[in-house]
Image (tube, helix red, strand yellow):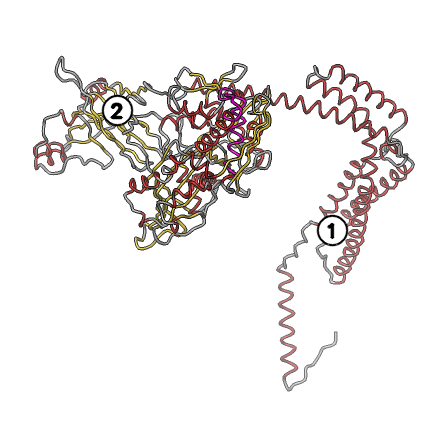
Amino acid sequence: MTRIGLFLCLWLSLWSDTVLASVLAIDYGADFIKASLMKPGQPFDVLLDRDSKRKMQTVVGWKKEDRLFGKDAANVAGRFPLDSFSSLKFLLAAPYDSDATSFYTSIATGDTVRTERGTVALRRSDGTQWAVEELIAMQFAYVRDLAESTAGEKVNDVIVTVPPYYTQFERDAVVDAIEISGLRTLALVNDGTAVAVNYAMTRAFPEPEVHVIFDAGASSVRATVVEFAPVPDPKAKTKVVRDATQITVHGVGYDRYTGGTELVKRLRDMMLSDFQKRYKRDISNDKRAMAKLWKEADRIKAVLSANQEAQATIESLAYDIDYKGKFSRSEFEAACRDLKSRFAVPIREALVHAGLKLDNVSSIIFTGGASRTPMVQEAVRSEFPSTKLAFNVNADEAAVLGAALHGAGLSRQFKTKDIRIADIGPYDIQASYQSEVKQPGARPRTINTLVFPVGSKTSTKKTLSFKRTEDFSGYPAEILEAHILGVADAIKNLTEAGGAEPVVKATVMLSESGFASIRDAVLTGEFKDESITGKLKDFFGKGSSESVDETTVNVGEAEEDTSTTTSSAAAAASAVSKKEPIPLEIESKFPALAPMSVTEKRVGRERLKAIDTQELSKRKHEEARNTLEGYIYKLRDLLSDESPSAPFMKCSQSEERKKIAQKVDETLVWLNEHGDDANTAQYIEQRSALETLERPIVHRYKEIEEFPQALNNSQLWNWHSTLFLEDARANLTRDLEAGIAAGMSAPLKYTKEELDDFEKTLKEHESWLDEWVEKQKKVKMNEDPVILTSEMRARAKVLENHLQRLYRKPPPKKPKKTSSSTAKTATTSEAASASESASASSEPVKHEEL
């Protein structure tokens, strides 16, 4: 049983009040890093590195003073073996004297040293030491920079995949590296669970299905038994939530040291043995030679996955010897014979852990880079039917894409398929503490309480109840010692307030990311209910004792407390009530491997900032020099082209070209003599002096180039304005004539004053344009223009705005009818009706003469 103690989780804070903009997902492997960015409005895919590769090698290194990442860092390992660091995943939270450190030194050329915390740091050839967390933080920061370049904005939140077997120590180290890199931990997700999310995203599960995610990676082999099921609708038990999937992890199995890295190690040892046998030279202590062998062995392993034979070739491996060797797949598999039987073991262990048989499983889904190795596939086929094996996910990218989708599901910025996860913890989480001594001279005994057994669901919490009268400590020796302080004073305050039966309650949380932590500790008690209702309850003995929630665990002290609860005691308990609990102080210590302190992480962050600043300054320095050199050669090319049709010749004067040529020669001399020692500001100053001389020529050329379009734009608005003015005046005349004929004033959209004012603006623009265009026609190409295209556009804009203001003027409202006009209309109607009636009668109508 692995004991994980009561752990105070300070840095995995909730972010529910924060709206996330972009979410970065990182699948950090021993050989490769894969990343994905979720950003609103951006296509969802794997993040590309600067070489447009979909995955980058997990290597950070230096070429003298230049820091390198990925392929570039791996390529210099043969030349700078002490400055190239790979396979850092094996050293996460590894004690210096552990098997993990020994394994690392057998596969890598880095120089390991012990840190003050007892973990591992790596030392460069110049003596600089870097903690493993700091080196991994550099890689995280590099991925963050790629993401920010793609997103065009800051990226702060990250979700990282981890193997399901990671202990609290290793998870601490991952989070420490994230914090040092300047990122914020959104969550850690088990890589098998991440693959399950990716698998469920494009599939529907009307009925429950069980699958095994078989992940064969570089560092290890692990298997995760996952159930995919529809989500019951809480409002209608017979229905399910639409487009929702419940992912439940039932069991995990793993082998921490069987993976692709071990296969490469066996192949490298074969090549080493072959070289030493043929040339009688021992090169096992030659770090450059061993780095070259490792790189070639990794290549040969990939070749043998698709071919029966492979030719190894290493130029100048050692002692100026060019090494060549041929290796077959059968020889390689014979050297790994003892490993073959171990590849399928995690699947069996996961099924046993889940309490399931193979018949309950729909498929075994292969993922991970080493799953392509024929020997690994044959090992699984030898124990499980081929009909159960599935290769329907992307072996390299399923985990990182699933992690990104899970991170998006945690954010409010994205709308994704409703996928709910119920993961499990792989270890027992046990609290240990010493019993309270009740007799003088008695020895306290250690009480162990299993809080979260293996397979407990994450995102759950339990409350531990202790009947104590003094401060006490709970500790497993491996992780953390938590001192709960202030118990005696709290009991005194409780007693003075009339309370009884004091109980210390500590809440232990198993987070979604697999962290166990003490959330709080309080002292509670019971108080007599002096109300009439309470006294009646006490008199009749009704009610029941306080019920214990299923997440509450009464631990340890029940074994020592011999008093029993009788019916009368239960009746008395019914007449008591709870009051606000009294918070207690928790003081944590790390007797074993402690995570990095806040100070250590701050120092690490400052070291990374310093190296980032240094590299940024160096890049700017190199860019300034390269830009200056390129500008000099550009000007020389322009000066050497003496063709009359060349734009530079057309727009420049002889005296200007002489000054530029003289300054170019002076700058070249300065660059040759002082360029290596110059700073960035001096490079910029030299270029600015050249630009000052060239700027008038460039200005003329641009003005000549833009003049036709600016003139066309001005004339176009003149034409539009003229047409509008003619049409508006015609409409004004027609409306006025119609109003006079009707004996009333008709509403007008434009007044004569408005049109006259607009006509004035139009004529002023036409006059100005005609005048200055004629002047510009007399200017030569190598003379400064008398009219600027910017001024032409500005004046045309004034005319355009005036026209738009008139054009968008709302039409006038029709006048409302007055009472006099209404009466007149009514009288006219009555007269018409009387006339019609008279003409219809037999008597002729007599008209009186006026």
Of 320 and 423, nearer the camera is: 320
**Residue at numbered disc 1:** 750
Residue sitting at the far top: 441
Q: Residue at x 72, y 50 (%)?
A: 807
Q: Is residue 585 visible?
A: no
- Residue 292 magenta-highlighted: yes
**Residue 168 quadrant:** top left
Q: Is residue 14 left or right of residue 791?
A: left
Q: Start and end of the magenta stretch?
A: 277-303
Where does the image place residue 319, in percent across and percent down from the top left? 57, 21
Residue type, mark 1 in image: Tyr
Badge 2: how crowded within 10 Å, few (<14), some, or many (20+)? Answer: some
Of 604 and 62, nearer the camera is: 62
**Viewer-side label of 2, 1:** 2
Residue 582, label in figure: 2
Residue type, mark 2 in image: Ile
Q: Residue at x 44, y 36 (%)?
A: 217
Secondary structure mostly taken by the magenta-highlighted segment of the chain: helix
Q: Quadrant location of the C terminus? A: bottom right
